[in-house]
Amino acid sequence: MNKLALVAIILVAGCAETNTQAGGSDPRLASVDEKWRMIAAREKQCVDEALRRGRDETERIVGTLDPSMALQIQQEADERDREISLCRAAADNEAAEISERERNEYQVEAQQESNRASFMAIVTAPTH
């Protein structure tokens, strides 16, 4: 009878833990969502700044009426495109780091769940 009581207590505790995790929104997911929003905001700010600098430089070049204006404008457009690519690459790197951390956390949780299931199988296994 004591073994049955022990199993019942473990099952109730395990179910209670599972139910509290499943109920409501997961704060970790909210944190990840916030990180994604921050990355997107930084990327947008970086791209906007690169575009603004590009427009400012183009206006300066056009104002000089230099004969090599077309070449300068093309060089400035190329520089702006390079800066935008760097912004996007930085955002991609941040996103990859977050994804890696989350993947590792979920793997640890899956292993813990597997360990709990193995323990429950051993505890509840009939003894002869």
Image (spheres, rainbow, N blue to C red):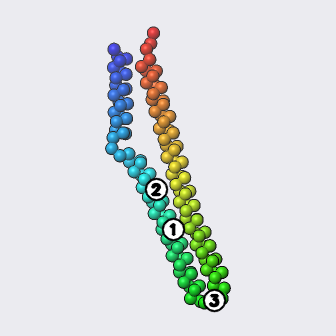
Q: Nearer the viewer, residue 24 or 119?
A: 24
User: Image point 59% across, 85% down: which residue?
Assistant: 61
The kind of secondary structure element at disc 2 is: helix
In the rendered image, residue 8, in percent from the top left (x then y), is placed at 34, 23
Q: CA distance from mark 3 to mark 2?
A: 44 Å
Read off the residue under disc 2.
Answer: 36
Earlier residue among tags 1 and 2: 2
Q: In which image quadrant can residue 50 be found?
A: bottom right
Q: Which residue is mark 1?
A: 46
Q: Secondary structure at mark 1?
A: helix
Of the pair 67 and 118, the residue shown nearer to us: 67
State the quadrant of the N terminus: top left
Quarter placement of the C terminus? top left
Q: Nearer the viewer, mark 3 or mark 1?
A: 3
Residue type marked 2? Trp
Mark 3 highlights which residue?
Answer: 66
Please state the horizontal and vertical placement of residue 45, each as a whole percent of the image: 48, 68
Q: Is residue 115 left or right of residue 86?
A: left
Residues 66 and 107: in front is: 66
Which amino acid does the dot numbered 3 rest on? Answer: Asp
